[in-house]
Image (cartoon, rainbow, N blue to C red):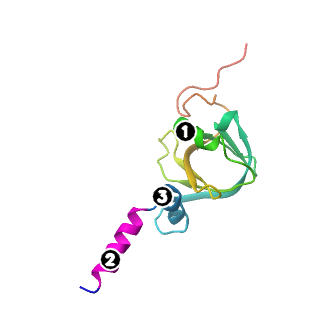
Amino acid sequence: MKYAVPFIFLLTSVAALSPAQKAMRKHQGMTSPRVTMKGTIKEILDGGRIIVLNDDSRWVIAPGDIEYTGGWLGPAPVFIVMDGGEQDDYPYTITNTWTNKSVHARKWNSNLNVDQKKQNTPKPTEN
């Protein structure tokens, strides 16, 4: 019975991880997500709807997470993990290491309007 306490502690400590800690565990290879990149925040646009990283990549934030990214500051370090499927609207998780907050995102597609789904409607033509 001497192993019961550490085993219970292990189970409860993993279950009690925050989303940022879970993303960090994934990032460190403790599970098997597809780590995409690391970077720093260069700009926050449109009240938190779009994040621009130091490599000029743009990321569209899920509507339910904009309340968090609107207050993020540059040059906060972030890491991005692909934890959803390609068919998901927001298949990436961006974690701000200063705030330990994770948000759902998708890559900016310059051919689409921010409000359009990436797999549906092409960008309207200008008349």
Residue in view at x 69 percent, y 33 percent: 46
Residue count near mark 2 (Cα–Cα under 10 Å), binned few <14, some 14–19, many ≥20: few
Residue extending furthest toward the bottom = 2
Residue in view at x 45 percent, y 62 percent: 17
Q: Which mark is residue 81?
A: none
Q: Nearer the viewer, mark 1 or mark 2?
A: 2
Residue 50: horizontal and vertical position, in percent? 66, 39
The residues bearing labels 1 and 2 have C-alpha atoms spaced at a distance of 37 Å
Q: Which residue is mark 1?
A: 62
Residue count near mark 1 (Cα–Cα under 10 Å), binned few <14, some 14–19, many ≥20: many
| Dot placed on the residue nearer the N-terminal end, 1 or 3 | 3
Left or right for 5, reference 33? left
Q: Which residue is mark 3?
A: 18
Callout 3, which amino acid? Ser
Callout 1, which amino acid? Ala
Q: Secondary structure at mark 3?
A: loop
| Dot placed on the residue nearer the N-terminal end, 1 or 2 | 2
Q: Nearer the viewer, mark 1 or mark 3?
A: 3
* 21 vs 116, nearest the viewer: 21
Residue extending furthest toward the left = 1
Residue 64 versus residue 29 in the image, above or below: above
What is the magenta range? 3-16
Q: Which residue is mark 2?
A: 7
